Amino acid sequence: GVIKVGTATGQIVVPPITALLILSLGWRTALLVIGLTAAILLLSAALMMRSPPARASGQPTAKDGNSLAEARRNLVFWRLCAVQFLVFPAMMSIPLHFPVHGTDLGMSKSTAAQLLSVIGFSSIAGRLTVGALVDRIGGKNSYALCILVFMAGLFSFVFITTPWPLFVATAFYG
């Protein structure tokens, strides 16, 4: 939910910054700047992490699910792993083609790059509402609904031949 909004915010902020860096520095230097910035930020965040305080003896501990050992013996766990393994590479590689598809449909490069930000905005909306959805219809049904909306957005790309419907389909994809 709320914690995952940070990554969606990055999807909104990073594409325009990347576009500006590429236009002003060239793609090789821009890629180097982005990589070094990411390395510095990630290392800084890792160095700031602290272990949670130890619990006093006798205090109850919350258990939010199965342990890893319990999960590894569960067929549902392995099915979810297989689905994620098969879906994520496709899901993460498709957005790389959105700006190219947008320019093929007549968008300017800067407008086509905004398609990536649309994914971020729709991800924020989705991540904030899925928690409530899980409470109402359960995790399994919520997951199925999310996959259905994602697939509807994905399949619609085949039929889009003008620029602006691409923004709507991208929102469903995100």
Image: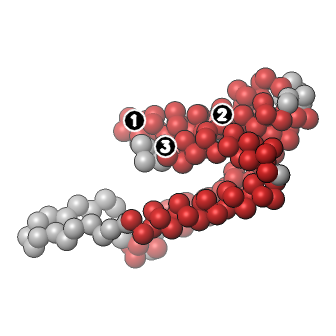
Distance (Cα) linking label 1 and label 3? 15 Å
Q: Is residue 135 left or right of residue 11?
A: left
Could you say where residue 60 lies in the image, as x and y percent from the top left? Answer: 14, 64
Q: Is residue 94 left or right of residue 105?
A: left
What residue does disc 2 label? 118
Kindly check if marks 3 and 2 are in contact, taking CB atoms under 8 A apart as contact: no
Task: Give the mark nearest the N terminus, 1 or 2.
Answer: 2
Quarter containing the C terminus = top right
What residue does disc 3 label? 5
Residue at 79%, 51% (x, y): give it.
Answer: 25
Could you say where residue 89 lies in the image, as x and y percent from the top left? Answer: 70, 58
Comparing marks 1 and 2, which lies closer to the viewer? 2
Kindly check if marks 1 and 3 are in contact, taking CB atoms under 8 A apart as contact: no
Task: Give the mark nearest the N terminus, 1 or 3.
Answer: 3
Quarter containing the N terminus = top left
Crowding near pointer 2: few (<14 within 10 Å), some, many (20+)?
A: many
